[in-house]
Amino acid sequence: MRPQVVAHRGASHEIAEHTLNAYLEAMGTGAGGLECDVRLTADGHLVCVHDRDLRRTAATRGLVSTMDLAELNELDFASWKNPWADLDDEAEAADEDDGRGVLTLRKLLETVADYDRRIEVAIETKHPTRYGGLVEKRLVDMLRDFGWDQAGAPVRIMSFSYTALQRVERLAPEIQLVQLFDKPNHWPVLKRMIGRDWIVGPGIKMLRQHPKIRESLGRNSRDVHVWTVNKEKDLDLCLDLGVTAVISDKPRFMLDLLDTRFGASE
């Protein structure tokens, strides 16, 4: 079975993660899905940012949860990936609106909704957070705005927090859920606790190091979505396991490898 390729924070190996350009690149190269992390701003907006603070991706010590959307939009979330770009005389001049500000989840979902083919979005809520369950409530409210809180919608919600996923299940029982985990001792407990239709999302490093977990997942009837798969040998491990999605920083590379094994996808 050919797994879906999901672009981890967009085509984030080449382009700064969680920027609109990274997601446009991933969609343009044929990724079937996009992955994003969401956090809540001080004024209640869901934004696509992984870290709780902004030192790595925006060169400031501020916290996402203490800043308003307008403040975040004043920051540059793209330059850290290529800090020498301004010295490139042959580079095209950046537009005033070049997507360097923070990407809101609403903007990403609007982009996906307007695209000319179905793109699925895997949305990870980050915990712990000062806003607790408000993150999931705001997220479900937004999905309802798009009509994407029903079965068959092109979205799924992921989290390492079992409690967070339970909240989503109560708010919108038909939304697809993915229980993430990266500790082998968590799986024996999780497989007894999580919902019957939940997807499991193990980390590739754990799968490499713990063959017994791979065997257990292989015997389980659940769909498996693995992160973050960037190497050919790791893709082969996933194919042997029969996973249904691989989440990768290098979606084009993964698609090319899959084309050699399954033939080019249409």
Image: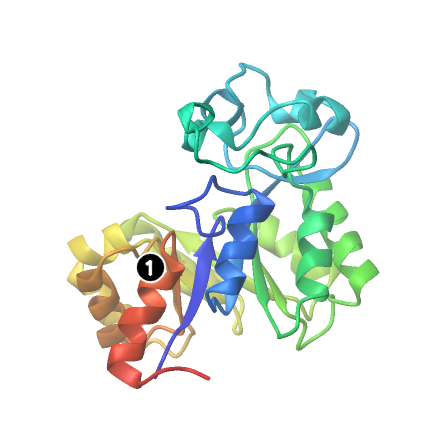
Q: Is residue 84 shown left or right of residue 136?
A: left
Residue 100 image position (x, y, % from top left): 60, 33
Q: Which residue is the extreme one toward the front?
A: 90
Residue placed at 62% from the left, 74% from the top? 118
Residue 257 image position (x, y, % from top left): 27, 71
Is residue 158 among what the camera can see?
A: no
Give the amino acid at mark 1: Pro
Residue that numbered label 1 is attached to: 188
The answer to whether 220 is drawn above or below residue 46 in the figure is: below
Residue placed at 68% from the left, 76% from the top? 151
The answer to whether 265 is drawn above or below residue 38 in the figure is: below
Is residue 239 among what the camera can see?
A: yes
Pick the front one: 160 or 42 = 42
Residue 175 image position (x, y, % from top left): 66, 67
Pick the front one: 121 or 266 = 266
Residue 203 image position (x, y, % from top left): 33, 53
Q: What kind of element bears circle 1?
A: helix
**Is the N terminus in the top left, top right, bottom left or bottom right quadrant?**
bottom left
Q: Is residue 122 shown left or right of residue 175?
A: left
The answer to whether 194 is drawn above or below residue 61 in the figure is: below
Q: Which residue is the extreme one toward the top?
A: 61
